[in-house]
Every structure is written in structure tokens, then in C-alpha cells.
Image (tube, rainbow, N blue to C red):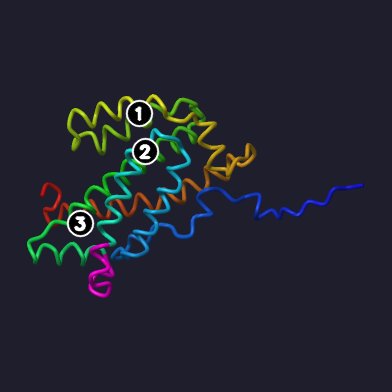
């Protein structure tokens, strides 16, 4: 007697990226604050599945998200867009949300580089199992220049616990071994919007000389 399979093709193709309720907003226009912060919370959900190597980044992201929600909730109409929120602070000569978004963007940039390394490595056919070099490259290009000696040493220690490619893809495939191509495809799409938001915010901070407040 044949066993009925109740799992639809759509269900089989789900990954940790596609089950997120919201992704990063379109970076071609001003970034919607609510959409951006919810998407940033979504990336925390992803990271919490990767193991303790990402715990410092998770804590940092969560802390800065809370600060930005606090600022947004003071006037959700005026602060509909991130750029408007930050520019209003400059008029008030304040830096609370400006610094929070600066550090949130740096953490997101770190993750963007990490994903980019995995994507490029896969497209070249290497499929490297050891992701530690990608972790270190992403850190050196984004967070390390702004961390002190202690922060850098912490990340050096944590990098030893970076997940292997196989473990990471298994987690992103929602505990499945047969969706590697789908995970990579969804990672590309997710990374594209994440990277675009990071670039937009970097250019915005540079334009308004907010990078080194």
C-alpha cells in the first residue's frame, strides 16, 4: 500500500529565508522604519540558529533595534522613514538614534559580507566547509576598525566556533539535506536586498558626515 505524501512541493522548498515574515525594504527609496526594523529582527532569528559564534552580533543588533523602536514610537508619523528620523536628530543636536542605526548598519554589513563570501565561494564551485575565513574577513572589513582590543579578541575566540558549511546549510534548509540549491538561491535574493540597504545607509551617513559622531 502506497504511503500518501501530504507535503506539497511548496512546503519542500521552504528555507529559513522564505519563512521570515518580512524582508528588507526596497533601497531605491527612503527606508521604511517599521519594515527595516522588523527585517532586522528577522535576521536575528536566522543568526540564533547558527550557534554561539554570532551571539555578540545578536546582542548588538537587538540592543540597537530596541533603541530605534523607542525613537520611532515617540512620533511614528514623523519617523516613518529612517532617513527622516536621523535628520531630525541632527536638527535637535542629538545622536541617540543616529548612533544606534550606525552600529546596526555595521552589524548588518558584517552579515552581508559573510553571506557574500558563501555565495561567491559556492558559485566558484569550491563549496568550502570551513567558514571561519569568511567570518574573519567579514569582521575585519566591517566591525574590527571600530572595536577596541578586547572586542577584537572576543571575535577571534568566537570565530573558532563558526559553523561548517554543511551545518549552516542544513539549518537554513530547516533541518533538511536536500535543499542546498534552494538555500543558495534564497540566500542570494535575501543578500541582494540586505546589501542594498547597507549601501544606502552608508552613503547617507557619508553624505551627512554622520559616520564618526
Asked which secondary structure carries label 1, the reply is: helix
Q: Is residue 178 left or right of residue 79?
A: right
Q: In this view, does 5 lie to the left or right of 44?
A: right
Give the percent coordinates (x, y) of residue 187: 48, 46
Q: Residue 204 carries which label?
A: 3
The residue identified by callout 1 is 158
Question: Depth check: 52 or 162 in front?
Answer: 52
193 displayed left or right of 16: left
Q: How many marks?
A: 3
Task: Check residue 55 in the rendering and tell me which mark sits there, or answer none.
Answer: 2
Image point 43% across, 57% down: which residue? 23
Q: Could you tell me which residue is drawn at 40 percent across and 35 percent down?
A: 117
Can you give x and y, in whole percent of width and height, for residue 110 in the image?
A: 32, 40
Q: Nearer the viewer, residue 162 or 66?
A: 66
Could you classify mark 1 by the number of other residues whose Cα lies within 10 Å: few (under 14), some (14-19), or many (20 or more)?
A: some
Residue 151: quarter of image: top left
Relative to 131, residue 197 above or below: below
Circles 2 and 1, Cβ within 8 Å, touching? The answer is yes
Q: What stretch is highlighted in magenta?
A: 70-81
Secondary structure, mark 3, is: helix
Question: Counting residues from the N terminus, which is met first, the one under dot 3 or under dot 2?
Answer: 2
Question: Foreground residue, 168 or 153?
Answer: 153
Depicted 21 relative to depicted 111: above or below:
below
Amino acid at each position: 500500500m502506497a504511503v500518501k505524501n501530504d507535503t506539497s512541493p511548496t512546503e519542500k522548498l521552504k528555507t529559513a529565508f522564505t519563512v521570515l515574515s518580512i524582508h528588507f525594504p526596497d533601497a531605491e527609496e527612503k527606508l521604511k522604519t517599521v519594515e527595516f526594523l522588523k527585517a532586522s529582527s528577522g535576521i536575528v532569528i536566522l543568526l540564533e540558529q547558527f550557534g554561539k559564534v554570532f551571539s555578540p552580533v545578536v546582542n548588538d543588533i537587538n540592543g540597537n533595534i530596541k533603541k530605534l523602536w523607542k525613537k520611532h514610537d515617540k512620533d511614528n508619523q514623523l519617523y516613518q522613514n529612517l532617513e527622516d528620523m536621523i535628520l531630525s536628530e541632527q536638527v535637535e543636536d542629538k545622536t541617540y538614534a543616529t548612533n544606534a542605526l550606525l552600529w546596526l548598519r555595521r552589524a548588518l554589513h558584517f552579515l552581508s559580507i559573510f553571506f557574500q563570501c558563501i555565495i561567491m565561494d559556492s558559485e566558484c564551485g569550491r563549496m568550502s566547509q570551513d567558514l571561519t575565513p569568511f567570518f574573519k574577513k567579514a569582521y575585519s572589513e566591517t566591525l574590527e576598525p571600530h572595536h577596541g582590543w578586547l572586542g577584537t579578541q572576543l571575535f577571534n575566540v568566537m570565530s573558532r566556533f563558526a559553523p561548517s558549511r554543511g551545518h549552516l546549510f542544513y539549518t537554513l534548509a530547516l533541518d533538511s539535506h536536500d535543499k542546498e540549491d534552494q538555500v543558495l538561491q534564497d540566500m542570494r535574493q535575501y543578500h541582494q536586498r540586505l546589501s542594498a540597504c547597507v549601501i544606502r545607509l552608508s552613503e547617507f551617513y557619508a553624505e551627512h558626515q554622520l559616520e564618526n559622531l
